[in-house]
Protein backbone atom coordinates (compact mmCIF):
# COMPACT_ATOMS: atom_id res chain seq x y z
CA UNK A 1 0.00 0.00 0.00
CA UNK A 2 1.44 3.37 -1.06
CA UNK A 3 1.49 5.90 1.76
CA UNK A 4 3.04 8.81 -0.09
CA UNK A 5 1.70 12.32 -0.49
CA UNK A 6 1.79 14.32 -3.74
CA UNK A 7 4.39 17.09 -3.89
CA UNK A 8 4.18 20.18 -6.06
CA UNK A 9 6.46 23.07 -6.99
CA UNK A 10 4.51 25.82 -8.75
CA UNK A 11 6.58 28.47 -10.58
CA UNK A 12 9.10 28.64 -7.75
CA UNK A 13 11.79 31.31 -7.71
CA UNK A 14 14.51 31.45 -5.05
CA UNK A 15 17.52 33.71 -4.61
CA UNK A 16 20.62 34.39 -2.58
CA UNK A 17 20.69 38.14 -2.20
CA UNK A 18 20.19 39.60 -5.67
CA UNK A 19 21.20 36.39 -7.43
CA UNK A 20 18.31 34.20 -8.56
CA UNK A 21 19.29 30.53 -8.34
CA UNK A 22 15.90 28.88 -8.97
CA UNK A 23 13.81 30.24 -11.84
CA UNK A 24 10.14 29.48 -12.48
CA UNK A 25 10.39 25.81 -11.53
CA UNK A 26 7.21 23.77 -11.74
CA UNK A 27 7.23 20.06 -10.92
CA UNK A 28 4.47 17.65 -9.91
CA UNK A 29 5.48 14.50 -8.02
CA UNK A 30 2.89 11.76 -7.83
CA UNK A 31 2.19 10.11 -4.45
CA UNK A 32 4.52 7.20 -3.81
CA UNK A 33 6.75 7.93 -6.80
CA UNK A 34 10.54 8.27 -6.69
CA UNK A 35 11.90 11.36 -8.48
CA UNK A 36 15.60 12.08 -8.95
CA UNK A 37 16.70 15.68 -9.49
CA UNK A 38 20.04 15.77 -11.28
CA UNK A 39 22.27 18.55 -12.60
CA UNK A 40 25.64 20.16 -12.13
CA UNK A 41 26.80 21.83 -8.92
CA UNK A 42 25.22 25.25 -8.53
CA UNK A 43 22.23 24.46 -10.73
CA UNK A 44 19.74 25.10 -7.89
CA UNK A 45 18.84 21.51 -6.97
CA UNK A 46 19.49 21.74 -3.23
CA UNK A 47 17.94 25.19 -2.94
CA UNK A 48 14.77 23.93 -4.61
CA UNK A 49 14.24 21.06 -2.18
CA UNK A 50 15.13 23.25 0.79
CA UNK A 51 12.29 25.54 -0.24
CA UNK A 52 9.89 22.62 0.26
CA UNK A 53 10.84 22.50 3.95
CA UNK A 54 11.00 26.25 4.52
CA UNK A 55 14.77 26.08 4.98
CA UNK A 56 15.19 28.58 2.15
CA UNK A 57 12.58 31.22 1.32
CA UNK A 58 10.82 31.32 -2.02
CA UNK A 59 10.96 34.66 -3.81
CA UNK A 60 7.88 33.65 -5.82
CA UNK A 61 5.69 30.63 -6.39
CA UNK A 62 4.39 27.94 -4.05
CA UNK A 63 5.43 24.57 -2.69
CA UNK A 64 2.70 22.05 -1.92
CA UNK A 65 2.49 18.79 0.00
CA UNK A 66 -0.77 16.90 -0.34
CA UNK A 67 -2.17 19.99 -2.06
CA UNK A 68 -1.44 22.29 0.89
CA UNK A 69 0.79 25.34 0.99
CA UNK A 70 2.72 26.43 4.10
CA UNK A 71 2.82 30.06 5.19
CA UNK A 72 2.35 30.26 8.94
CA UNK A 73 4.59 28.80 11.65
CA UNK A 74 1.97 26.19 12.44
CA UNK A 75 1.75 25.20 8.77
CA UNK A 76 5.55 24.86 8.54
CA UNK A 77 5.58 22.69 11.68
CA UNK A 78 3.00 20.46 10.06
CA UNK A 79 5.01 20.38 6.81
CA UNK A 80 8.20 19.32 8.60
CA UNK A 81 6.34 16.51 10.35
CA UNK A 82 5.05 15.30 7.00
CA UNK A 83 8.36 15.60 5.10
CA UNK A 84 11.41 13.73 6.39
CA UNK A 85 14.70 15.36 5.39
CA UNK A 86 18.14 13.90 4.79
CA UNK A 87 20.48 16.89 4.33
CA UNK A 88 23.61 16.83 2.21
CA UNK A 89 25.95 18.04 4.96
CA UNK A 90 24.37 17.34 8.36
CA UNK A 91 25.43 19.78 11.06
CA UNK A 92 26.54 17.94 14.19
CA UNK A 93 27.73 20.79 16.39
CA UNK A 94 30.10 20.22 19.29
CA UNK A 95 27.65 18.87 21.83
CA UNK A 96 27.20 15.31 23.07
CA UNK A 97 24.24 14.23 20.94
CA UNK A 98 24.48 10.47 20.75
CA UNK A 99 23.60 8.35 17.73
CA UNK A 100 20.89 6.72 19.83
CA UNK A 101 19.35 10.14 20.47
CA UNK A 102 19.55 11.07 16.81
CA UNK A 103 17.70 7.93 15.81
CA UNK A 104 15.09 8.46 18.53
CA UNK A 105 14.39 11.96 17.14
CA UNK A 106 12.89 10.25 14.08
CA UNK A 107 9.77 9.48 16.11
CA UNK A 108 10.17 5.73 15.58
CA UNK A 109 13.37 4.53 17.20
CA UNK A 110 12.74 0.86 16.42
CA UNK A 111 12.37 1.53 12.70
CA UNK A 112 15.40 3.84 12.61
CA UNK A 113 17.46 1.25 14.48
CA UNK A 114 16.42 -1.42 11.99
CA UNK A 115 17.77 0.70 9.14
CA UNK A 116 20.90 1.54 11.13
CA UNK A 117 21.53 -2.19 11.51
CA UNK A 118 21.16 -2.68 7.76
CA UNK A 119 23.62 0.16 7.18
CA UNK A 120 26.12 -1.19 9.75
CA UNK A 121 26.00 1.82 12.08
CA UNK A 122 24.02 0.29 14.96
CA UNK A 123 27.26 -0.44 16.87
CA UNK A 124 27.74 3.32 17.26
CA UNK A 125 24.57 4.01 19.28
CA UNK A 126 26.51 5.33 22.27
CA UNK A 127 28.91 7.43 20.19
CA UNK A 128 28.50 11.23 19.90
CA UNK A 129 27.50 12.10 16.36
CA UNK A 130 30.33 14.63 15.98
CA UNK A 131 32.80 11.76 16.36
CA UNK A 132 31.44 9.82 13.38
CA UNK A 133 33.13 9.71 10.00
CA UNK A 134 31.37 11.37 7.08
CA UNK A 135 30.06 8.06 5.78
CA UNK A 136 28.90 6.88 9.21
CA UNK A 137 27.07 10.15 9.81
CA UNK A 138 25.40 9.97 6.42
CA UNK A 139 24.14 6.47 7.17
CA UNK A 140 22.80 7.54 10.58
CA UNK A 141 20.99 10.56 9.16
CA UNK A 142 19.42 8.36 6.49
CA UNK A 143 18.31 5.88 9.16
CA UNK A 144 16.69 8.72 11.07
CA UNK A 145 14.96 9.94 7.90
CA UNK A 146 13.55 6.51 7.07
CA UNK A 147 12.51 6.12 10.71
CA UNK A 148 10.54 9.35 10.34
CA UNK A 149 8.62 7.85 7.42
CA UNK A 150 7.64 4.95 9.67
CA UNK A 151 6.52 7.52 12.25
CA UNK A 152 4.10 9.14 9.80
CA UNK A 153 6.05 11.30 7.33
CA UNK A 154 4.65 10.68 3.84
CA UNK A 155 7.50 12.27 1.90
CA UNK A 156 11.27 11.78 2.11
CA UNK A 157 13.56 14.45 0.68
CA UNK A 158 17.19 13.34 0.41
CA UNK A 159 19.96 15.68 -0.75
CA UNK A 160 22.96 13.73 -2.11
CA UNK A 161 22.42 10.87 0.38
CA UNK A 162 25.30 8.78 -1.03
CA UNK A 163 27.99 11.42 -1.51
CA UNK A 164 30.22 10.13 1.33
CA UNK A 165 29.71 6.42 0.62
CA UNK A 166 31.66 3.81 -1.32
CA UNK A 167 30.11 1.91 -4.23
CA UNK A 168 28.63 -0.81 -2.02
CA UNK A 169 27.15 1.79 0.30
CA UNK A 170 25.66 3.68 -2.63
CA UNK A 171 23.99 0.52 -3.91
CA UNK A 172 22.63 -0.26 -0.46
CA UNK A 173 21.18 3.21 0.07
CA UNK A 174 19.72 3.35 -3.45
CA UNK A 175 17.90 0.08 -2.85
CA UNK A 176 16.54 1.31 0.50
CA UNK A 177 15.19 4.50 -1.08
CA UNK A 178 13.67 2.59 -3.96
CA UNK A 179 11.84 0.23 -1.62
CA UNK A 180 10.13 2.94 0.47
CA UNK A 181 6.34 3.19 0.19
CA UNK A 182 6.35 6.99 0.51
CA UNK A 183 7.05 9.75 -1.98
CA UNK A 184 10.78 10.26 -2.47
CA UNK A 185 12.48 13.33 -3.95
CA UNK A 186 16.24 12.81 -4.14
CA UNK A 187 18.95 15.18 -5.32
CA UNK A 188 21.75 13.04 -6.70
CA UNK A 189 24.65 12.68 -9.10
CA UNK A 190 24.81 8.91 -8.71
CA UNK A 191 23.47 6.64 -11.44
CA UNK A 192 22.88 3.84 -8.97
CA UNK A 193 20.34 6.08 -7.19
CA UNK A 194 18.82 7.26 -10.47
CA UNK A 195 18.31 3.63 -11.51
CA UNK A 196 15.96 3.09 -8.54
CA UNK A 197 13.79 6.11 -9.39
CA UNK A 198 10.63 6.23 -11.47
CA UNK A 199 11.40 9.60 -13.01
CA UNK A 200 14.45 11.77 -13.60
CA UNK A 201 14.48 15.53 -14.11
CA UNK A 202 17.46 17.81 -14.60
CA UNK A 203 18.22 21.34 -13.46
CA UNK A 204 20.53 23.73 -15.29
CA UNK A 205 20.97 27.41 -14.57
CA UNK A 206 18.17 27.30 -12.03
CA UNK A 207 15.64 25.95 -14.52
CA UNK A 208 14.06 22.54 -14.77
CA UNK A 209 14.51 20.60 -17.97
CA UNK A 210 12.14 18.03 -19.36
CA UNK A 211 12.47 14.54 -17.89
CA UNK A 212 15.16 12.49 -19.57
CA UNK A 213 13.08 9.32 -19.40
Image (spheres, rainbow, N blue to C red):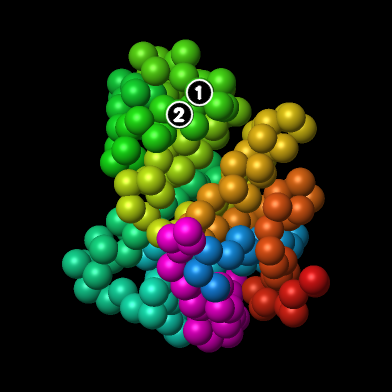
From the viewer's perspective, tell me whether residue 161 is left or right of residue 99: right
Q: Is residue 198 at all visible to an observer of this figure?
A: yes
Query: Answer yes or no: do the residues labelled 1 and 2 have beta carbons within 8 Å?
Result: yes
Q: Residue at x 50, y 47 (%)?
A: 87
Q: Residue at x 50, y 84 (%)?
A: 10
Q: Main secondary structure of the magenta part?
A: strand
From the viewer's perspective, tell me whether residue 148 is left or right of residue 191: left
**Residue 85, disc:** none
Distance of mark 1 from mark 2, alpha carbons? 5 Å
From the viewer's perspective, tell me whether residue 213 is left or right of residue 123: right
Residue sitting nearer the eye, 51 or 108: 108
> Is 185 rendered above or below residue 128?
below
Image spot of residue 190 (x, y percent): 75, 48
Residue sitting nearer the eye, 84 or 58: 84
Image spot of residue 88 (x, y percent): 55, 46
Quadrant of residue 213 in the image?
bottom right
Q: Write down the region rendered in magenta.
A: 1-29
Q: Residue at x 30, y 27 (%)?
A: 101
Residue 13 covered by magenta stretch: yes
Quadrant of residue 62 in the image?
bottom left
Q: Residue furthest front?
A: 1
Secondary-structure class at tag 2: helix
Q: Which residue is mark 2?
A: 114
From the viewer's perspective, tell me whether residue 178 is left or right of residue 144: right
Image spot of residue 161 (x, y percent): 60, 44
How many residues crowd mark 1 within 10 Å: few (<14), some (14–19), many (20+)?
Answer: some
**Residue 117, disc:** 1
Amino acid sequence: MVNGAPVGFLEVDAAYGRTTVVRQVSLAVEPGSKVAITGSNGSGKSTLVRCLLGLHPTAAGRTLVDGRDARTRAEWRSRRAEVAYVPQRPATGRFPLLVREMLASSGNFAAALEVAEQLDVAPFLARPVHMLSGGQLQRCVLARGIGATRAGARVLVADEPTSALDFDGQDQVAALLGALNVTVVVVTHEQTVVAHCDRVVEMAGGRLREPRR
